[in-house]
Image (cartoon, rainbow, N blue to C red):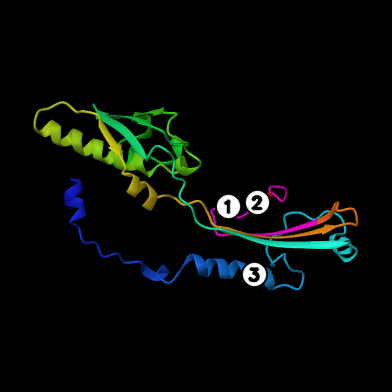
């Protein structure tokens, strides 16, 4: 199966997003920061503001500024994505290291109801957020149903099916950790004590709001 797969010559239609890139997203984030005279709020939602920050910066003995960029990253857990499913007598049983089993509906590809699915949550191999989306459960559910149907035609009992992604597939098809950008500005008094702090955060991840006190 692996050798046959390597022979495939796939042409992808990337559609209207073909011109998008990480560099382009990062440039947009920085443009938002510079769009307002009250930089670096960037015109986006303000998480929090405590005290007279502008006055503290104006009277500071020293002001320190720094920028940090972080790229899209694969989660790369020790254990590649995998799942085991057994479709038998119209019911589906799954053993999977999913972090949120209910997030993916494994019943749909198997053609059954949710009440006919038994899920065993296996604590193994690391997650780091990658296993919040467990599309491998969807994949193995469909395969398990197909295997059971074909074996039934041949008068054979159903068997469990184990799906194990290759390390290459796990890296290439990850739901990548979001990239982003931080602009920090700090004010120090004459003794070196931090008296004011400003942080502009930009990211193109799934979560648009980050608590103001969740900074590195």
Whether the magenta-drawn stretch holds residue 207 is answered as yes
Task: Name the residue tied to disc 3.
Answer: 32
Magenta residues, start to end: 197-214
Q: Which mark is residue 161?
A: none
Q: Position of residue 196 (x, y in %)?
A: 83, 56
Q: Is residue 21 above or below residue 215?
A: below
Q: Quadrant of the N terminus?
A: top left
Give how far apart the Cα atoms at labels 3 and 2 are.
17 Å
Depth order, front residue of 158/6: 6
User: Of the residues tagged 3 and 1, which is closer to the observer?
Assistant: 3
Q: Residue at x 19, y 33 (%)?
A: 148
The x, y position of residue 11, in whole percent, is 26, 65
Residue 4 placement, left or right of 201: left
Which is nearer the eye, 42 or 93? 42
Q: Are marks 1 and 2 in contact (CB under 8 Å)?
A: yes
Q: Which residue is mark 1?
A: 207
Residue occupying the point 47% across, 67% down: 21
Decide if residue 166 is on the left or right side of residue 184.
Answer: left
Give residue 141's quadrant in the image.
top left
Write down the residue under mark 2: 210
Residue 173 visible to an observer of this rendering: no
- Residues at marks 3 and 2 touching, judged by CB atoms closer than 8 Å: no
**Residue 71 against residue 113 in the figure, above or below:** below
How many numbered marks have been drawn onto this rendered protein structure? Answer: 3
Q: Position of residue 7 (x, y in %)?
A: 17, 56
Q: Is residue 14 magenta?
A: no
The image shows residue 107, relative to residue 204, as above or below, that is above
């Amino acid at each position: 199966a692996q050798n046959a797969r390597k022979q495939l010559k796939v042409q992808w239609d990337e559609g209207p997003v073909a011109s998008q890139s990480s560099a382009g997203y990062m440039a947009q984030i920085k443009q938002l920061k510079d769009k307002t005279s009250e930089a670096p709020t960037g015109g986006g939602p303000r998480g929090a503001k405590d005290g007279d920050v502008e006055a503290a910066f104006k009277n500071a003995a020293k002001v320190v500024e720094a920028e940090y960029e972080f790229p899209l990253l694969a989660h790369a857990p020790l254990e590649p994505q995998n799942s085991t499913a057994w479709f038998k007598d119209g019911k589906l049983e799954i053993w999977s290291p999913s972090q949120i089993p209910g997030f993916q509906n494994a019943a749909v590809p198997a053609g059954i109801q949710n009440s006919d699915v038994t899920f065993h949550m296996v604590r193994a191999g690391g997650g780091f957020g990658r296993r919040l989306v467990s599309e491998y459960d969807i994949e193995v559910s469909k395969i398990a149903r197909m295997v059971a149907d074909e074996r039934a035609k041949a008068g054979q009992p159903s068997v469990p099916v184990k799906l194990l992604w290759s390390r290459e597939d796990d890296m290439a098809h990850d739901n990548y950790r979001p990239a982003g950008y931080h602009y920090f500005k700090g004010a120090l008094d004459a003794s070196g004590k931090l008296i004011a702090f400003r942080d502009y955060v930009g990211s193109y991840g799934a979560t648009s709001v980050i608590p103001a006190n969740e900074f590195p």
